[in-house]
Image (spheres, helix red, strand yellow):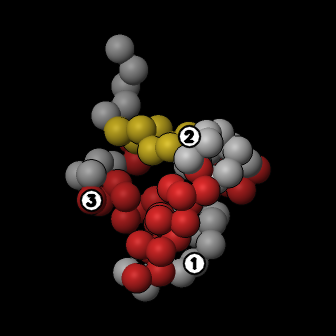
Amino acid sequence: MLPYRTMLFDFDYTLGDSSRGIGASVNAALTALNYPVPKPDLQGIHLAMWRLESIPETTLYVGDSVVDALAAH
């Protein structure tokens, strides 16, 4: 079993057909919550972990770009 409790997936137009809608929805939600900061700023990731009651040690962040890799560290 993996040591992760939470897995965060970052779909931004390249991994799935519905990614444009997902990306637009996430961006709208973050903007509405006053988190208009683009990646690799960690505010969005930390907000997601907080809402899911998770911590970095038990969270796996999955992305599809160099910026996502920077955000994961």
Image coords of residue 11 (percent x, y): 58, 48
User: Image quarter for residue 37?
Assistant: bottom right
Which comes before the other along the chain, label 2 or label 1?
Answer: 1
Residue that label 2 marks:
62
Task: Say left or right for 38 vs 27.
Answer: right
Q: CA distance from mark 2 to mark 1?
A: 19 Å
Q: CA distance from mark 1 to mark 3?
A: 18 Å
> What residue do we see at 27% from left, 59% from top?
51
Find out whether the residues at labels 1 and 3 contact each other: C-beta distance under 8 Å.
Answer: no
Which comes before the other along the chain, label 3 or label 2?
Answer: 3
Find out whether the residues at labels 2 and 1 contact each other: C-beta distance under 8 Å.
Answer: no
Q: CA distance from mark 3 to mark 2?
A: 17 Å
Q: Check the image and report above or below for 63 versus 39.
A: above
Disc on res. 7: none
Task: Say left or right for 63 vs 55.
Answer: right
> What residue do we see at 63% from left, 66% from top?
39
Residue that label 1 marks:
37
Amino acid beneath label 2:
Val
Q: Secondary structure at mark 3?
A: helix
The answer to whether any part of residue 58 appears in the image is no
Disc on res. 51: 3
